[in-house]
Amino acid sequence: MTSLDRRSALLALARGGCALAALGSGCGGEWRQAVVLDPPPEGAACSGLPPPGTAQEGWVEVRLSDHPALAAPGGHAEVRLPEALLDVVLVHVTPGCFVALWRICTHGDCAVDWLPDEGVAECPCHGSRFAQDGRVLQGPAQRPLTVFTAVRQGESVFIHRPR
Ligand code: FES
């Protein structure tokens, strides 16, 4: 079964379970969106990442249900959490693997945009471009974007924001 088949099957199962439960007064007649993600495949570059730690250690939880665009590889979302001093673009790069790039351009004070078709971040102010590992691909920026460790666990991605 392909991952898409499995995702479809799980969504269908979730719908069916809700429909059955609705008969017995569960679910309250409302449909909640299910976000079903594949875990990182064996040997994936991200599968060796450590499990996330605590908020006191700088780990910030991003619930995938708050960013449905992240459900599929290739999806991305801008995540701004001022209370955690976090302003990143979170990208689902390969099944179950994510990168979190700082959004503020190192050339100035502009927020970069993620270009999913090219897999790069681009600054709208003067055109600097950055790879998904933060490297400068095109100036005038000279310094790379900071990339934070991002670990998927359950239905959340935890980003490590060192303090
Ligand atoms: S502020 Fe980003 S390229 Fe100048």
Image: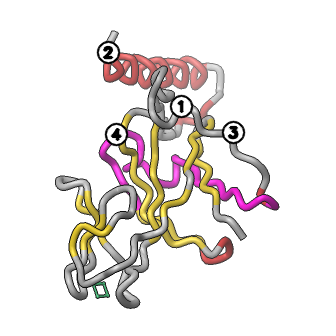
Q: Which one is in front in this view, the residue at disc 2 or the one at disc 3?
A: 3
Name the N-terminal-most of marks 2 and 3: 2
Residue type, label 3:
Pro
Callout 2–callout 3 Cβ contact below 8 Å: no
Residue type, label 2:
Thr
Q: Residues within 10 Å of mark 3 (few under 14, many from 20)?
A: few
Q: Is residue 112 above or below residue 131?
A: below
Callout 3–callout 1 Cβ contact below 8 Å: no
Give the structural element (helix, strand or loop) at label 3.
Answer: loop
Name the N-terminal-most of marks 4 and 1: 1
Residue at image location 60% in from the left, 39% down from the top: 49
Residue at image location 45% in from the left, 52% down from the top: 99
Label number found at residue 51: 3
C-alpha span from label 1 to label 2: 20 Å
Label number found at residue 2: 2
User: Based on the displayed image, in which of its 4 quarters is residue 105 positioned?
Assistant: bottom left
Label number found at residue 126: none
Q: Residues within 10 Å of mark 4 (few under 14, many from 20)?
A: some
Name the N-terminal-most of marks 2 and 4: 2
The residue range painted magenta reads 56-77
Residue at image location 58% in from the left, 25% down from the top: 22
**134 displayed left or right of 119:** right
The residue where tag 1 is placed is 47
The N terminus: image quadrant = top left
The C terminus: image quadrant = bottom right
**39 displayed left or right of 116:** right
Name the N-terminal-most of marks 1 and 2: 2
In the depicted view, which residue is nearer to us: 105 or 155?
105
Give the structural element (helix, strand or loop) at label 1.
Answer: loop
Residue type, label 1:
Ser
Residue 140 x, y percent position in the rendering: 24, 84
The residue where tag 4 is placed is 73
